[in-house]
Image: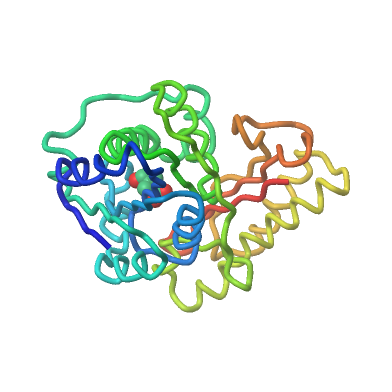
Amino acid sequence: MKRFEKADTIRQYLHTFRTESTIGFVPTMGALHEGHLALIETARRENDVVVSSIFVNPVQFNNPDDLARYPRTLEEDCQKLEAAGCDVVFAPSVDEMYPTPPTLHLNFGSLETVMEGAFRPGHFNGVGIVVAKLFNIVQPDRAYFGQKDLQQVGVIRQLIRDLSFPVELIRCPIIRETDGLAMSSRNRNLTAAEREQAPALFQALTLAHDCLLDEQSVTQTKAVVTDFFNEKPEFRLEYIDIVNANTLQPTDYVLAPGQTAICLAAHLGKVRLIDNLVF
Ligand code: PAF
């Protein structure tokens, strides 16, 4: 596996492949888990060359403690990427990506006003800026993103459309632990006791799903989930929303199959967890 730290060098290296080969790209912030490796494996099956990036992007963190606590495990990550079939990794420094702090501001309209956008002001601006830069550096044919960050998938879809990036966006399923907890780099920051409690997020999603299938209203369903967390004082529920899985806008009704998403975010100790269920 080739490893690059400089944008110009990786761009030049990939140039030789561009005419004859397809490039699949998996952007990450490292601290890789099975969810990331599943993205690499899908990219491996669908492309000639697989590129991944590891960059903890300061511009997308609205909370400095969250940025400081974000796990950094570069050497271990590179070994995992190589074993999963990645050909090229780009692991730039902050100075390489941002020689000067970006002043550009991306506005994702209604996508910014709900859920993650509402609770993490500036987050999607930072995601959009770094993904646009990475797309310009790597110039992939396909880019792979996990459904766990469903709203991020919507933001990238809009970025690709609004800025005419010639990139096909591939949304890949959430990978869960056997007890239902969605895999996330932040799970490493849970204490042993919190790790035992964390599957409650998936239980809450399942509960909401059952309520909706049982024809309870969206309001009733949200109240059931709120009560569920009220009985678990170790959690602080931030939001539970039932939305259109593509536009991320709230819906009062269950939509066509595959179009409704139940999304939630909750704090457990110092860790903020998100999860969703699309049905
Ligand atoms: O999902 C992530 O890990 C990050 O938001 C991404 C897409 C790599 C941008 O920093």
* Lateral position of residue 36 relative to residue 255, left or right: left
Residue found 30% across the figure and 61% down from its top: 69
Which x, y percent locates residue 152?
Answer: 47, 40
Front-most of residues 35 and 274: 35
Task: Decide: is 16 above or below 236.
Answer: above
Which x, y percent locates residue 91?
Answer: 23, 54
Residue found 50% across the figure and 55% down from its top: 45
Q: Residue furthest front?
A: 20
Way the structure is coloured: rainbow
Q: Residue furthest right?
A: 214
Q: Quadrant of the N terminus?
A: bottom left
- The quadrant holding residue 197 is bottom right
Task: Decide: is 164 above or below 229.
Answer: above
* Lateral position of residue 103 relative to residue 135, left or right: left
Q: Residue furthest bottom?
A: 192
Q: How many marks?
A: 0
Which x, y percent locates residue 125?
Answer: 35, 32
Residue found 28% across the figure and 33% down from its top: 136
* Lateral position of residue 39 relative to residue 263, left or right: left
The answer to whether any part of residue 273 appears in the image is no
Front-most of residues 138 and 36: 138
The answer to whether any part of residue 44 appears in the image is yes
* Lateral position of residue 263 relative to residue 156, left or right: right
Which x, y percent locates residue 102?
Answer: 20, 31
Front-most of residues 239 and 109: 109
